[in-house]
Image: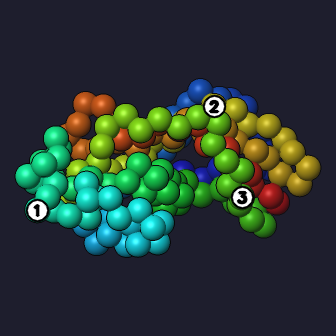
Amino acid sequence: MVHLDPRTDLSALHGTEVAVSPWLAVTQRMIDEFADVTCDPQWIHIDPARAAAESPFGTTIAHGFLTLSLLPHLYQTCIDISPRRMGINVGMNRVRFVTPVKVDSRVRGRFAIQEVKPIEGGIQIAWNATVEIEGEAKPACVAEWLTRALV
């Protein structure tokens, strides 16, 4: 776990990878539940038999937005920003889904600080976030993610 203190000058970390999360398995249950919650029941995600027969991937795949939605969990497993009163997701400047995440694959997050800037009551960090797939040459997702730590 990497600890970052938002009261200190973190500018020396610009361009530096600060943390890599543990691996997380992406299960069919996760995919099915995400499909239910987002009302996106496309067969390439939720029908293993059809995906095996008709999909170019040979199995079901996670939604790209499921992969993206794992970033906060992956982040929290390897980065602690404290003291802080609260953390806020500000948004994404750029997101690309590079490689589909096949069911039962394991993913992890890599987090590099692109920029830290002071804001009223705290800091805003632009992260270069990469979601890797175990055993794959290309990542599942690359994103520029903005977060705020309010102290």
The percent coordinates of residue 3 (x first, y second) are: 60, 53
Residue at 53% x, 37% y is 95
Please name the residue that numbered disc 1 is placed on. 49
Q: Secondary structure at mark 3?
A: strand
Vertical arrangement, residue 20 with respect to residue 138, above or below: below
Residue 88 numbered tag: 3
Please name the residue that numbered disc 2 is placed on. 114
Q: Name the amino acid, label 1.
A: Ala
Vertical arrangement, residue 123 with respect to residue 60, above or below: above
Label 1, label 3: how many angstroms apart (C-alpha)? Answer: 40 Å
Of the image marks 1 and 3, the number of the one nearer the N terminus: 1
Q: Name the amino acid, label 2.
A: Gln
Is 137 on the left-hand or right-hand side of 71?
Answer: left
Is 53 on the left-hand or right-hand side of 67?
Answer: left
Front label number (3 vs 2)? 3
Q: Name the amino acid, label 3.
A: Ile
The percent coordinates of residue 150 (x first, y second) are: 80, 58
